[in-house]
Amino acid sequence: MFNGSDAFYYSSCSSLCERVGPWWDMQSYYNKWTRQILRDVSFYMKSGQIMAILGNSGSGKTTLLDAISGRIGHKGTLLGEVYVNGSQLKKEQFQDCFSYVLQHDNLLPYLTVRETLTYTAMLALQKHSKEAIRKKVDSVMAELSLTHVADTVIGGRIFNGISSGERRRVSIAAQLIQDPKIILLDEPTTGLDSMTANHIVLLLSQLARKDRIVIISIHQPRSELFKIFDRIAIMSCGELIFCGNPQEMISFFDDCGYECPEHSNPFDFFVDLTSVDTRTKEREVETYSRVHAIVGAYRDCEQFQSTLEYIDSSKKSKEQQKIPFKRRETPSEICKLVVLFRRIVRNLSRNKIGIFMRLSQNLVFGLFIVLFLIRLNNDVLKGAVQDRIGVIYQCLGGASYTGLLNAVALFPALRAISDQESKDGLYQKWQMLLAYIIHILPFSILSIVIFGAVMYWTVGLNPEITRFGCFLAAILVPHLMGELLTLAVLGIVNNPTIVNAGVALLTIAGILVGSGVLRSLQEMPQVFQFISYVTYQRYSCELLVVNEFYDLQFTCGGENITNANVQCLFTNGNDFIENSYPGATSRITFDFLMLYAFVPAMIIGCIISFKIRDILVHR
Amino acid sequence: MTNLNLKVTSGQMLAVIGNSGCGRTTLLDIITCKDEGGKIKSGQILINGKLTTKQIVKKSVAHVLQDDQLLPHLTVRETLLFIAKLRLPRSYSEQQRQKRVEDVIAELRLRQCANTRVGNAYTRGVSGGERRRVSIAVQLLWNPGILILDEPTSGLDSFTAHNLVITLSRLARGNRLVLLSIHQPRSDIFQLFDLVLLLSSGATTYSGTAKDMVQYFSSIGYPCPRYSNPADFYVDLTSVNYRTKEEETETLERTGSLAETFREKVKDFDDFLWKVNDGNRELPPGETRANVHTTPLEKGIKIDANEVDELPKGLHQFAVLLNRHVSNDFRDLSTLLIHGIEAVLMALLIGFLYYGQGENQLSIQDTIALLFMKGSLTPFAVVLDVVAKCHSERAMLFHELEDGLYSITPYFFAKVIGELPEHIAFVVFYSVPIYWLANLNPGVDNFFLNFLLMWLVVYCSRSMALWMSALLPTLQISSFMSNAIYTASYLTGGFIIRLDTLWAVPYWISFVSFLRWGFAGLMQVQFIDLTYQVQVGNFSINIPGKQIIQNLESDTYPLYASYLVLIGISAGFLVLYYLSLRFIKQKSSQEW
């Protein structure tokens, strides 16, 4: 049983960059300024304790938590060290040592509480038997008193599920599954009403009593909580004003000459006392010097000296204890993928609107074509060629576009979850992405079949069953590619609205260059002819044209084909194919192979994009 | 909400406290005449002894909402200056306005971030607490007679919250009435309140002065323990606990009896406030307890007619809004860049794809395709951008209109005209490179006619997108519908499907299809005075441009008809946009 003590030592400067001024004022825009956020913060904690970090906004609470958990990243630089059980943590060990519960709950809305926790458990502790995982989940739910909502769905903005306090507890439970010895929470009570907030803090203190270390940053704690915390740290302007237990705190401030009045909340009183009032210059000077005096007093006082001594001694101590890592029997990568896949499918299976949207959007586009065209005819003078080309063009563009809409509407929520959970080290972002891609395949196929079945036969395209099959096969890839392309861009660009516009234009550009419908391929400048080989639209469109026009007979004006006048350039489909896509009939197999090669290639592209995201988001 | 009687005089600060779900927001909504929280079944609200109407409320009540609705790219000071120009009477000079803004900035301790952008979820800006204070500052600017704040301290740190409440109480002293809802007041804040209304599931459990609350509850047998915040204690006491069934019934009973006790105690006072030493009064026999809700707010609040009349009117509002709109757009570098790069890239792509300079002149077929592409791709990019942008501003528009900050007409014109610079730049970036690269008709007239047509077609789609985003409540539905309209217009454009094969319904649709008119016009402008050489075998035939147009039936209507119809269509969309703004509430429900 782990029963050690943990010491954190800091002499920390963490700096942030910011830009000021409008962009056209170049000088001030590029005049970045850096500031030191944490200064000389050192403290230690023993297991079984709960610590609250107090302070006004901008005092460095969250930065301190980020620093402890090693999540400062590119945003700033950190000078300081974290010791656990007397050994200094290395960069890659942070993730395995701390559990960090963020301020926002990122949970899949359609899963029940039990499912959410079970899937997390399966991701973290794959090697355990089903029974063991079930027990673990049950015990964690009992610990956080979630048992009564175990089988309720979590809920989202559109529909109701569990309450916000319960949602927060599910977030905490998801971290507890991994048996962390040190849990950090950023403002766990914000946005909850007072009763729920108290309940959560009480639960956290109970968690701490079971040999864990709990550190929370908290905003406006209520007076009842005063006695609950083992340690209270007050931050102001990036400096640690005081750190110690509640009794010590009161006597410390008493000694400084600031006695807490009897009928007020000591938390509030001390935080107010130590914050700097910037309203007027005089007030600022006055309050700042007060804060400075208190910091000076703390530096001299017993607690601080003993902290330093303690840290020194445990740094020097020869006996090296083990660092208590989270329970992590990392499952194989394939297993993670399977679990993620099951989780996404389960979530989507309850999302009726999402499923309906996925299946019906293509159909809506198809109905549009049907509405305007009703039925194709075979007379060249009445637009036999033009209308067919129009239908092919519309199918190609529409299918990509619906794929784009699906991805933009459904993926960003999952992306937020994968950002968070990959930071916890549960899995890599691309695994979630791959699970998502696998789960859309059947829906895409089904939706294309529904669309094709309605559109193909009402409009009256070539009525051979095999050609219908080919049509579906050739239109499936554009639909998939629309979605995959959007996923790849979503990996790098955050704002879904921008992605929507950007990818829409990208697919149109692809049609322009590749399809040959709008610009004859032979007459394009050389460069674009080369580019057209790397657009899926080229292969898809060629297939669709051959599929539709091969062996098709046209009429011209009346019944008489031989009497063709100048306006009828083509009397049968083969002529048209030879004219616009020379040699296309002999390339069918090649085109199919090329077309389907785009799907795996694009999936690899998506994975690369999410690898880049790893670097971009690393904060 | 049942049986609520309350009288507040000006110069006082009333805090409505209670746990979530107790009816705080509903009460405030009723007082501010917002119809969201349901209707008043019975009961009345009086201001200065007169029944309230929307007009009176608009003139005297400022309501600070819980969520912040601000333009993200303006700095804090700019935000306030624009509001000051709209809100402060015309008699104020420029210096006075600036003075007032600086005062408010100092009062709410915003000086540090005065030159920082406000920001939103996607753009970095001031912190959440600061944004909260900016929202309050916006309302403080115009010195309202009644100031209503919904949860003003949530998200603020204790120090700022305390200072804010001190500020509010100082405001109240200056012959104003401040009403705020708060769910967890700290002890030091609680002491600042004059009056307290403690609600529990819609019923009053206490209303009276803050300092007497402890005494009242002690007198009915619930003393407040030492070292604890009376507000917290009594809110917990009166809140209903839904955790288990037993607790729920138990707490429900307790709050019910507390409310009953309180009603008994105060029914003899004309102002329905509990006062000290009135424990032993004769209670008259029970009255009927109908669902009465009366909140007579009686006070000498100045609803100064003169002052209101002097508020800036139409033209001035328009100028300020226009200025604000342009400043906000112009500061948003990333969006400007994205749109600019998007336009230039697309233009270069199409231009080089149909490269027609020098030897390789475009064939007829390709020229036609190019003209259609040019006339239909550009509008498409605009539709998506405009819908997204309008929806991001929608919530703020709703709030400011509700507030009576400005009226629809100035906003409409400011919006329409404010978008013009961006619009012109966009069309120039898009259509000029294509024209030159593809070597379209070299005549100078033709170039300008072509440009004008492009301008009009894109403007049609822009006004259509504006209309759609004002008409429909969510971003998704709006973008879906504008896409549908665009696609309908696209399919009936005369290129994808031949116009003469269309059956009745799409045939009629094609008359309002802006892409069709644009396409027909572009065709005429391009081909009217050119002769094309076509190689057939060894012969080359000269085909006059007129014949091409005839073949494609693009000349059914004269050229000026295209311009007139396009102007008509965009004007029609703008009228519809105006009507939607006027008659449809711009409530926003965004889901991304």
Image (tube, coloured by chain):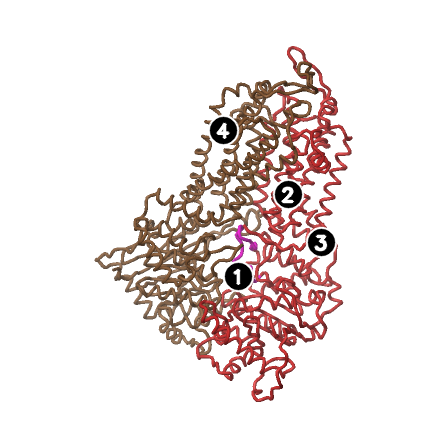
Q: Which residue position is annotated with label 2?
A: B482
The chain letter of the brown chain reads: A
**Circles 2 and 4 in contact, beta carbons < 8 Å:** no
Amino acid carrying label 3: it is Arg
Q: Residue B25, relative to residue B478: is it above or below?
A: below
Q: Quadrant of the N terminus of chain A?
A: bottom left
Neighbourhood count class around disc 1 (C-alpha, 10 Å): few under 14, some 14–19, many 20 upward: some
Circle 4: residue type: Val
Question: Going 25% across and 55% down the picture, which residue do you hit?
Answer: A322
Chain ID at mark 3: B
| Viewer can see residue B233 | yes
**Of the two numbered discs 2 and 4 in the rendering, the one whose residue sits closer to the viewer:** 2
Q: Which mark is residue B582?
A: 3
Chain B as rendered: colour: red
User: Mark 1 falls on what kind of element?
Assistant: helix
Q: Is residue B122 magenta?
A: yes
Instruction: Please report the residue visible at 73 percent of the width from the left and 27 percent of the height from the top.
Output: B553
Q: Position of residue A59 (x, y in %)?
A: 45, 62
